[in-house]
Image (spheres, rainbow, N blue to C red):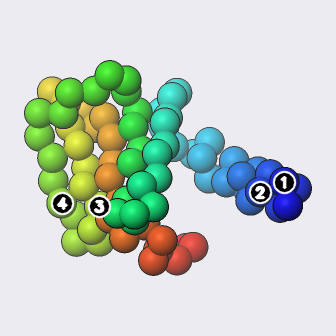
Amino acid sequence: MATIEVEKILALVPESLKIPRDRMWMTYDKDADILYINFKKPSHADDSELTEDDAIIRYEKGEVVGITILNASKRKAG
């Protein structure tokens, strides 16, 4: 079981390294089916926008500090 989980996580590495950020934190709320990705801690978003594909981009002073992905489990690998 642990081997399968590690393999899934390792499969994320190549795409994760393409994200132009040095730090990233992720939290998944299973009950709400929302994935929170933060690029800054602490972050104090002062603006946000909802995209057509149900993602909320959060900004602090014009800089993207996080992304909230709604209906996360229904997303398909691209």
Q: Relative to 2, does residue 58 appear above or below in the rendering?
A: above
Image quarter hosting the N terminus: bottom right
Where, quadrant-wise, is the C terminus in this rendering?
Answer: bottom right
**Residue that carries the numbered disc 3 in the rendered image:** 55
Element class at badge 4? strand
Nearest the viewer among 17 and 38 is 38
Distance of mark 2 from mark 1, alpha carbons?
Answer: 5 Å
Q: Secondary structure at mark 2?
A: helix
Quick one: label 2, few (<14), some, or many (20+) residues within 10 Å?
few
Q: Helix, strand, or loop for circle 3?
A: strand
Which residue is at a point 23% across and 43% down the rendered structure image?
A: 58
**Residue occupying image coordinates x 27% and y 68%:** 54
Residue pictured at 18% horizontal, 60% vertical: 50
What's the distance in space between the residues labelled 4 and 2, CA to CA?
31 Å
Given residues 71 and 21, the one toward you in this image is: 71
**Amino acid type of the residue tagged 4 in the rendering:** Leu
Q: Is residue 38 left or right of residue 22?
A: left
Q: Residues within 10 Å of mark 4 (few under 14, many from 20)?
A: some
* Residue type beneath disc 2: Glu
Q: Which mark is residue 50?
A: 4
**Mark before the other along the chain sequence, 1 or 3:** 1
Residue carrying label 2: 5
Query: As shown in the figure, which amino acid type bears the numbered disc 3?
Result: Ala
Discs 1, 3 touching: Cβ within 8 Å? no
Q: Amino acid at mark 1?
A: Ala
